[in-house]
Amino acid sequence: VSQESIDSVRPQTPVKPMTATEVKVNVSIPEAAERAAATGADGVGLLRIEHMVLSLGKTPETYIKDHGERGYQDELIKGIRTVADAFYPRPVRVRTMDAPTDEFRELAGGESEPTEHNPMLGYRGIRRSLDKPDIFGQELAAFKRLYDMGYDNVELMLPLVNDAEDVLRAKQHIESAGIDLSKRRWGVMIETPASALCIEEIAQTGIDFASFGTNDLTQYTLAVDRNNENVADRFDELHPAVLELIANTIETCRELDVNTSICGQAASKPAMVRYLVEQGISSLSPNIDAVRDVQHEVKRVEQKLLLDSVR
Ligand code: PEP
Ligand code: MG
């Protein structure tokens, strides 16, 4: 039988192995939603709002000035819906804004952005959202409208938190926007060493999940700028210091009944997948092209763990 005829009878959507650890997928832009959903992934582990905003070509403030608050919300809703529809009822984890000031500067209206010596240590993620409640409020209003439309598969994720205070302050804004968090799944990214070290308090804020952003967690733990090619050979997500922060966080979260996941680039790397499944992570979210390999690697590691346990 020729290879060609085998391919022609192969199902389009790959048959995914059943695993206890969920394998989700990162969706970078809404246009990739259908292709991502066709991988058979268990949901979306990361959908970044800032990609939708950057593609508008204007800062949120400028877009709102030109098109109104409702117009801005409509754009966010359009992007999120595209992904939430493609995956429904599988969960889609949507992260609130996390663009550094140098990326905002490129946009119309960006000239009023602060010039920062090191934007990666600066005004981004939850820090910016807590400092700009009007803009954060527009994102939350978009979530609220999606929930009112029946998108109960949308989950809300907060980037770059350091401690429980960051989470509780954000939670107040979420609740003020009319979102009933007892009915929704929400959580945080663990991407600073502080957040990993404060996980016990963070886990008690009511979150459902904590997701490792290993791109940032590695950068901040090793003091290696993720965008600096001079130190790129020192950027190692498998460094023992990074792995220890992750392992301790998973253990604490398991004790406190909080789900754990990974949505950094390292979720696509077999060595990291092996390590995390062994530690008992709840889900992994690799890139679209890596989903299939990660599904099979998870299956292999889970089977090995099962065999080891009965030996
Ligand atoms: C991360 O830091 O690993 C992450 C997924 O977030 P971003 O790459 O958007 O900073
Ligand atoms: Mg990050």
Image: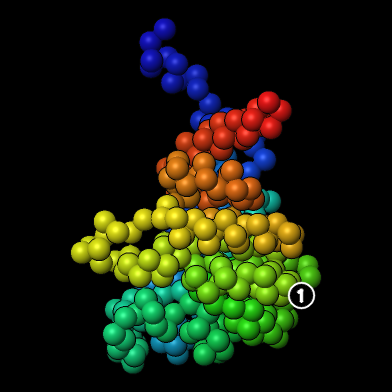
Q: Is residue 245 left or right of residue 103?
A: right
Q: Position of residue 224 (x, y in %)?
A: 32, 67
Residue shown at 67%/40% (left/top)? 20
Q: Position of residue 29 (x, y in %)?
A: 44, 59
Q: Quadrant of residue 182?
A: bottom right
Q: Quadrant of residue 306?
A: top right
Q: Secondary structure at mark 1?
A: loop
Q: Quadrant of residue 256?
A: bottom right
Q: Position of residue 189 (x, y in %)?
A: 55, 67
When the figure is inspected, residue 290 is found, relative to residue 174, above or below; the finding is: above
Residue shown at 50%/70% (left/top)? 193
* Disc 1 within 8 angstroms of ligand 1 (CB): no
Look at the image and tell me whether residue 110 can be seen. Answer: yes
Give whichever of 300, 35 is nearer the camera: 300
Q: Position of residue 160 (x, y in %)?
A: 51, 74
Q: Quadrant of the C terminus?
A: top right
For label 1, count other residues whose C-alpha is less than 10 Å away and answer few (under 14), some (14-19) or many (20+).
few
Residue wearing tag 1: 180
